[in-house]
Image (cartoon, rainbow, N blue to C red):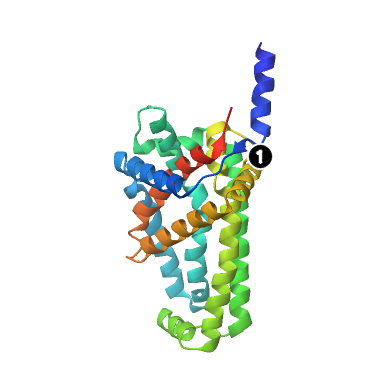
Amino acid sequence: MPAKKVSADADVRHTVPEVRSVGAPDIIDALMKGIADFNAKPTHLVFLCIIYPIMTLIIARAYSGHEFLPLVFPIIAGSTLLGPLAACGMYELSRRREQGLEVSWTNCFDVLKSPAIFAIATLGVVLGAIFVVWLAAAQWIYSLYFGETVPYSITDFIALALTSTRGWSLIVVGCGVGFIFSVLVLTISVVSFPLILDRHVDPTTAVLTSLKAVIVNPKSMAVWGIIVAGSLLAGAIPLFVGLAIVMPVLGHATWHLYRKIVVFE
């Protein structure tokens, strides 16, 4: 009997599960459940404690060396590429609440004790590598239009970007390339991290399942991507304060979207 159980578990962990088609009602329901999870156990203080020190360091670095200014926006915008990894704590809270377990904001750190932590870290390294490549691409695009020219202040950089043809070309091309990176991350991570946390699958199986989910639901995943991007932009406008609410809500909602997409026998 024990030998058969091990074999069955091995099959579950290395076999890509089935995925189902989802539509707008499913996405709306996932968002509503995400909001409910957040309201039940708010974690905005956790995110404020993470967001503001990082933003402060970036801004301080920008003021201390003007050569860093062209990378400020790519760093802030590109940080969303690491969002699926940062949201793992929210997946854990939603998982516990779904199972009727006691939930505290400290449970978001239980991920660090999960048997799936190695697989999560491995996929996190992949997202980190994508982030680094994005920064290199952003630097290359800036050099393509402005060469070695560097602004002397944030105001100077904004004026340079918004009042010249080269600046607008930089914005358009940069956003276009950033969009490609965002699609890549969405494709490999939309259900992979929740799946790893839930079923302890290996990273390859998780990524293949996420890819399958996008192939089966191209329109719905496009809508989800737009909702995520729009929500993050809206949350960032009021001095990034809104991100402390937007990010956990999206994390919880992603868990519920995963539940709707991935099917287990």
Residue 224 location, x and y as percent?
48, 54
Q: Quadrant of the C terminus?
A: top right
Q: Nearer the viewer, residue 111 or 18?
A: 18
Residue 131 location, x and y as percent?
58, 60
**Where, by quadrant of the figure, is residue 183 drawn?**
bottom right
50 sits to left or right of 70:
left
The residue at the far bottom in this view is 164
Give the secondary structure at mark 1: helix
Q: Residue at x 41, y 52 (%)?
A: 247
Q: Nearer the viewer, residue 254 or 152?
A: 254
Q: Quadrant of the N terminus?
A: top right
153 sits to left or right of 144:
left
Residue 46 vertical placement versus 239 (above, below): above
Residue 118 vertical placement versus 154 (above, below): above
Residue 143 location, x and y as percent?
61, 80
The residue at the far top in this view is 1
25 sits to left or right of 104:
right
Which residue, given by chain and number where applicable, does mark 1 sit on?
Answer: 205
Q: Residue at x 46, y 88 (%)?
A: 163
